[in-house]
Image (spheres, rainbow, N blue to C red):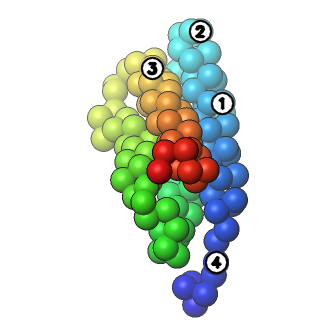
Amino acid sequence: MIDRIIILPTLHRTFGELVMLTTLVTTVFLIYLVWQRRSMNGGAKALTILTQLVLMGQALLGIKLLDQGMGTIQLYIHYLGGLSPLLFFLLIYWFPSRDAIRQTRWTALAAGGAFIFALLSYTIGGLYARGGLS
């Protein structure tokens, strides 16, 4: 049944823009907390969770598009660029800090890394889709 569902590439692109927005907002908010020397509050935790959910949704959309035969030329860009932002967040869970302020710093760094990878992936993927890098 799921094989009959067709995902349009425009949905993937739009979701990519949502990924960049959520990672940017999360990064800026966490940097603000670090600047204020405050630990993560409920809003920061909610933003971090939302960002990870959006990243997972984007990865699933990308996998579905690859399953449909789209984007196979840029396969490694999809895998590396699409899943690496999640790796940054996994690392903060795998290696938690006992100090709440330090954990906020590491989470801000993870969100910033996720944003940079998302921006690079979006740019490179867009160039491939428009034929600029083929």
Would you name the residue on which mark 3 appears? 105
Q: Identify the residue shown where x is 34% and y is 27%.
A: 97
Front: mark 4 or 2: 4
* Residue toward you, 72 or 20: 72
Q: CA distance from mark 2 to mark 1?
A: 17 Å
Of marks 3 and 4, which one's residue comes earlier in the chain? Answer: 4
Query: Sequence order check: which comes first, mark 3 or mark 1?
Result: 1
* Residue located beneath label 1 in the image: 25
Is residue 84 found left or right of 46 in the rendered image?
Answer: left
| Position in image of residue 61 (x %, y %) | 56, 64
Q: Earlier in the sequence, mark 4 or mark 2?
A: 4
Q: Residues within 10 Å of mark 3 (few under 14, many from 20)?
A: many
Q: Which numbered mark, 3 or 4, is in the foreground of this view?
A: 4
Question: Which quarter shows the N terminus?
Answer: bottom right
Q: Secondary structure at mark 3?
A: helix
Foreground tag (2 vs 1): 1
Q: Is residue 60 visible?
A: no
Q: Work out whether mark 1 precedes mark 4 in sequence or the reverse, and give the earlier one.
A: 4
- Tell me, yes or no, whether the two marked residues, 1 and 4, touch with CB atoms within 8 Å: no
Q: Residues within 10 Å of mark 2 (few under 14, many from 20)?
A: few
Which residue is identified by label 2?
Answer: 36
Q: Quadrant of residue 119?
A: top right
Q: Secondary structure at mark 4?
A: loop
Q: Residues within 10 Å of mark 4 (few under 14, many from 20)?
A: few
**Residue that mark 4 sits on:** 6
Tell me where residue 75 appears, x and y as whole percent: 40, 58
The amino acid at mark 4 is: Ile
Indicate left or right for 97 with 74 as reference.
Answer: left
**Which of the 4 image quarters holds residue 29?**
top right
